[in-house]
Amino acid sequence: MYLTTEKKSELFKNHGRLKADTDTGSPESQIALFTYRIQHLTDHLKTNKKDHSSRLGLLKLVGKRRSLLNYLVKNDIERYRAIIADLGIRK
């Protein structure tokens, strides 16, 4: 499997708000996890162009990440700018 529990805990530790393994609910950690999954699905779809079910999953993930980013914009613009710069996501 491409996403092991060690990789998840590493993502949460590096990008989470509390910088802890157990910080799974903060928007920053969820955005980091979605970004990792989006990158994996994008690479998968480059080789498998006719995999429409994975394409639908990718679109759903992008929408979830966008809604979390919109939440951060409304509530704390500095946290939003930090996660955008950290992950290299373009607006």
Image: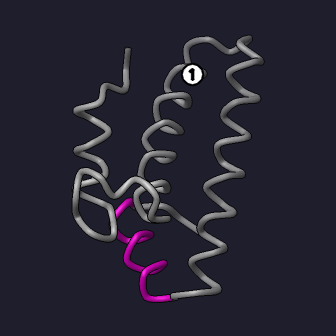
Residue located 73% across and 39% down the image:
59
56 sits left or right of 10 in the view = right
Vertical side of 90 occupied by 55: above or below: above
Location of residue 15 by image quarter? bottom left
Magenta span includes 8: no
26 sits left or right of 52 in the view = left
Camera-side residue of 1 and 48: 1
Q: Look at the image and tell me in which quarter the N terminus lies.
A: top left
Say what amino acid the circle numbered 1 marks: Lys
Residue located 49% across and 26% down the image:
43
Give percent across and percent down for residue 25.
Answer: 46, 58
Q: What stretch is highlighted in magenta?
A: 77-87
Residue located 66% across and 60% down the image:
66
Give percent across and percent down for residue 61.
Answer: 64, 42
**Circle 1 SS class:** helix
Location of residue 58 by image quarter? top right
Q: Look at the image and tell me in which quarter the C terminus lies.
A: bottom right
Camera-side residue of 55 and 15: 15
Location of residue 14 by image quarter? bottom left
Prevailing secondary structure of the magenta residues: helix
Please tell me how crowded label 1 is: few (under 14), some (14-19), or many (20+) other residues with Cα within 10 Å. few
Give percent across and percent down for residue 79.
Answer: 43, 81
74 sits left or right of 89 in the view = right
Magenta span includes 84: yes
Camera-side residue of 55 and 10: 10
Q: Mark 1 points at which residue?
A: 46
